[in-house]
Image (spheres, rainbow, N blue to C red):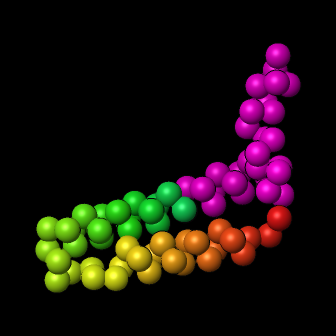
Amino acid sequence: MSRTFTRLFTDHPASVEESYIEHMRFAGWFAGQLLIAGLAALTHAILPFLFERTASRIIDRLHHRMHNRAG
């Protein structure tokens, strides 16, 4: 039972050649970037003269980073 529970946290990170901590760090950073992009897009929706390309630049950078990761 304990081994099965542990595998819930380690199988996916191992599949992308990361430890649990490495994966948590990357996923947390990625989530933070998405949050910033979302806030920029929301601000742009209300004030269209602000952050005209911020969200799309962040998303482009994240897409590139995700597809060029080791593993």
Image-quadrant location for residue 64: bottom right
Q: Identify the residue at horizontal 81%, vertical 33% (top origin).
A: 7
Q: Estimate the x, y position of residue 12 in percent, counting from the top left.
A: 76, 45
Q: Does residue 25 show up magenta in the picture? A: yes
Asked whether, in this view, residue 40 is left or right of residue 64, the answer is left
Task: Answer above or below: position of 45 versus 5.
Answer: below
Name the foreground residue: 24 vs 53: 53
**Residue 52 placement (x, y as % from top left):** 27, 82
Q: Is residue 50 left or right of residue 64?
A: left
The C terminus, quarter of image:
bottom right
Q: Position of residue 65 (x, y in %)?
A: 63, 74
- The answer to which quarter of the image holds residue 57 is bottom left
Q: Residue 68 magenta-drawn? A: no
Counting every numbered tag in the picture gives 0
Identify the residue at horizontal 51%, vertical 77% (top origin).
60
Quadrant occupied by the N terminus: top right
Residue extending farthest left: 47
Chief SS of the magenta region: helix
Could you say which is closer to the camera, residue 69 or residue 22?
69
Looking at the image, which is closer to me, 61 or 28?
61
Please report the residue visible at 30 percent of the width from the left and 64 percent of the height from the top.
39
Span colored in magenta: 1-28
Name the spot of residue 27 as percent of width and height, x first.
60, 56
Residue shown at 16% from the left, 83% from the top: 49
Question: Splitting the image into 4 quarters, where does residue 66 fall?
Answer: bottom right
